[in-house]
Image: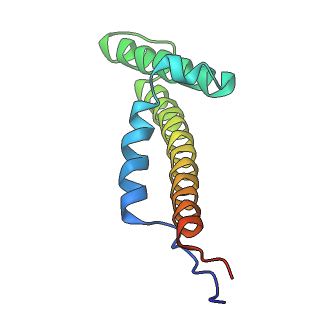
């Protein structure tokens, strides 16, 4: 019996697909499935709007501070979406490998 071949953590095809999916998952209908990430998405949109308001005139806080918070929130939502898409991609790849192994398996 051959030892199981381990997959690299970051396969180029899976990473490219996950990067695209992380952007597609910004759709609020998809984010509603995870209430915590939906709140982070709403917060990132609001802080971005507050940052733009602070640039236009007197805001609640300095624009740099608001944009710093906004960047952090956008990074959080994109990283969470990317991690979820990577897990889905690796799961699909593993399922495909198992499907192929099942059809290639010969009985004694």
- Is 69 rendered above or below residue 56? below
Does the rendering let one see residue 4? Answer: yes
Residue at 35% across, 53% down:
16
- The part of the image, by quadrant, that contains residue 2 is bottom right
**Quarter that holds the C terminus:** bottom right
Estimate the x, y position of residue 17 in percent, counting from the top left: 38, 49
Q: From the viewer's side, name the closer residue of 3 and 50.
A: 3
Estimate the x, y position of residue 50 in percent, counting from the top left: 45, 14
**Quarter that holds the N terminus:** bottom right
Q: From the viewer's side, name the closer residue of 1 and 85.
A: 1
Q: Coloured how?
A: rainbow
Does the rendering let one see residue 61? Answer: no
- Report the label total: 0
Residue at 42% across, 21% down:
48
Residue at 47% across, 66% down:
10
- Is 11 rendered above or below residue 63? below
Residue at 50% across, 45% down:
82
- The part of the image, by quadrant, that contains residue 11 is bottom left
Q: From the viewer's side, name the closer residue of 51 and 62.
A: 51
Residue lying at the far front in this picture: please name it: 108
Q: From the viewer's side, name the closer residue of 1 and 41.
A: 1
- Is 7 rendered above or below residue 40? below
**Left or right of 23 on screen, residue 73:** right
Estimate the x, y position of residue 21 in percent, counting from the top left: 42, 39
Estimate the x, y position of residue 30 in percent, counting from the top left: 53, 23
- Is 19 rendered above or below residue 14? above
């Amino acid at each position: 019996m051959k030892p199981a071949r381990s997959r690299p953590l970051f396969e180029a095809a899976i990473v490219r697909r996950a990067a695209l999916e992380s952007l597609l998952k910004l759709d609020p209908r998809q984010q509603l499935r995870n209430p915590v990430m939906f709140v982070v998405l709403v917060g990132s949109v609001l802080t971005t709007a507050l940052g733009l308001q602070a640039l236009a005139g007197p805001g609640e806080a300095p624009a740099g501070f608001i944009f710093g918070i906004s960047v952090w929130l956008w990074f959080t939502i994109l990283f969470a979406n990317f991690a979820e898409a990577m897990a889905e991609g690796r799961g699909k790849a593993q399922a495909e490998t198992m499907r192929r192994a099942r059809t290639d398996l010969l009985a004694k």
